[in-house]
Image: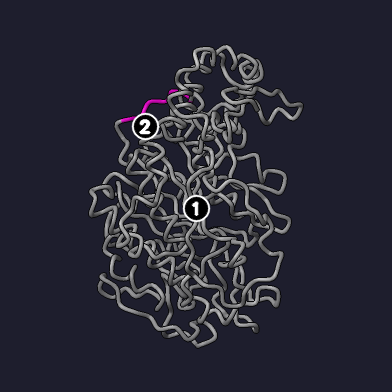
Amino acid sequence: MRDGSIAVRRLSTRRTVLQVGGLTVARCLWPFAAHSGAAETARRRAESVIFLWMGGGVTHIDSFDPKPEAPQEIRGTLEAIATRLPGIRFGEPMREMAAVADKLALIRTFSHDSNDHLLSQVYTLSGRKVNRSQLFSEPNIGAIVAHQLGPRNGLPGYIAVPGITRPGPPPHNLFVGGWLGQRYAPFCVGGQPEQPDFTVGKKDPNPSPFAEEDLRPKELDLPPAMTPGRLHRRQTLRQRLALAARWLEKTAPAGALDGQYADAFRLLTSQRVRKAFDLADEPSAVRDRYGRTKIGGRCLLARRLVEAGARFVMVDYGYDPDYGNLWDNHNAASQNFPHISKMCLRGYHLAGMDRAFAALLNDLDERGLLDRTLVVFLTEFGRTPKINARGGRDHWGMCGSIFFAGAGIRRGIVVGQSDRHAAYPLTRGYSPADVAATILHLLGIDLSGRLYDRQNRPHPVLDHGEPIAAVLA
């Protein structure tokens, strides 16, 4: 590409339209695309959402629902520790979260009927039950939020940090806009993973939890010759985008294109937006508080993004090139994991999650952001109460633990009770659809409304589920 030129390429794949240095504007345009125009209603209690997505199936009995009176093959070797809530105990790795239990609405009866990773993850990410043919067809909760409420402050309506989880094998990208269209898929700060199938390749048997990730989107990097000033001075840019418009107008209303271009170039040129993605601005003490781990850095970036005005930020931490399928602790020979009770104490496992989550909640609270930010911890299911012969726990959709905190949520409560082995709910179970309904309700999105797909066919916002009244303030 010649210095000062902007190349427009129309590809037969229809995936890449415009390149400005290292930026693929077609990819960047979609998260900013014109939304449905749905008004934010008076019912809105939350301004932003941080969706703590731990894909793989976090063990509930070792974290938020220990059973100290159960036999050792159920409870393992970990202790149950006291929390800020009288009579409520957490698992030994959750010491920091125990100290902030009074900020949580903990649900111990997260329950559904599938033990399949893919089906359960899609259900949890979308609030819709699916079969194998629908793994990529249903929009994520974040996609619905982006569609209904749109971008804000120059930031995409749905951001994934980093957005590289690929369950499998073979690997599947379940972070999708579904029938709403690719424009509502998340803006993934991490791009494509170098190793999509994280079950492949030799792993260190005891990898370090410490990691300094570069979470700044490469799309924000202009080539040296293309300064923001020069970008703004290009009076003929709009004409050069005409080729892109011809491609885009088939999938987006022509009247919305000007707004899409403006939003895309705002991302490129806005110092405030660029600054929001830069963890280097954070003091060392804050970095240490979250933990200098992958999960710590991702949670910290989520706080920076909602502070800058992002609506929906998903913290994605599960399948990892260094740690493998770190929550999926069957302890098969290929996983090379220690006994589940020892695994949970590692700094990249429950112990690291504990530190990062507690730091996030405290940081949001101290900055006055927790009252307007809804924080939701989700995983697709729990793990089997009985530890298997290899020292691991298997898939268990019947019972698990999740939590809400922040905007519109009651503080310091535990909802639901599991049986003496944390195997089945003794009280009402709450499904992924109920969780999705609670999130959308708190954002003021009308659950009785209709969404229209790319063929203008109507769909319910959710086809089942209802807000969890017990957690609502």
Q: Residue at x 52, y 82 (%)?
A: 74
- Residue 253, above or below 103: above
Q: CA distance from mark 1 to mark 2?
A: 23 Å
Instruction: Using the rendered image of the protein, determine whether residue 180 is visible from the camera's viewpoint.
Output: no
Say which of 337 and 29 sits in front.
Answer: 29
Which residue is the site of mark 2? Answer: 153
Helix or strand or loop: what does disc 1 sit on?
loop
Which quarter of the image is occupied by the N terminus?
top right
Sequence-wise, the earlier of marks 1 and 2 is 2
Helix or strand or loop: what does disc 2 sit on?
loop
Is the residue marked by circle 2 packed among few (<14), some (14-19), or many (20+) residues within 10 Å?
Answer: some
Q: Position of residue 26 (x, y in %)?
A: 60, 29
Kindly identify the amino acid type of the residue bearing the numbered disc 2. Asn
What secondary structure is the stretch in magenta mostly built from? loop
In the picture, measured across the screen, residue 40 lies left or right of residue 33, that is left
Q: Position of residue 436 (x, y in %)?
A: 47, 46
Q: Residue furthest right?
A: 12
Q: Residue at x 34, y 67 (%)?
A: 97
Q: Position of residue 464 (x, y in %)?
A: 52, 43
Query: Which quadrant would residue 134 be assigned to in this image?
Result: top right
* Labelled disc at residue 262: none
* Labelled disc at residue 214: 1
Is the residue marked by circle 1 packed among few (<14), some (14-19), or many (20+) residues within 10 Å?
Answer: some
Residue 157, magenta (yes or no): no
Where does the magenta region start and end? 35-41
- Residue 328, above or below 66: above
Instruction: Using the rendered image of the protein, determine whether residue 347 is visible from the camera's viewpoint.
Output: yes
Viewer-side label of 1, 2 = 1
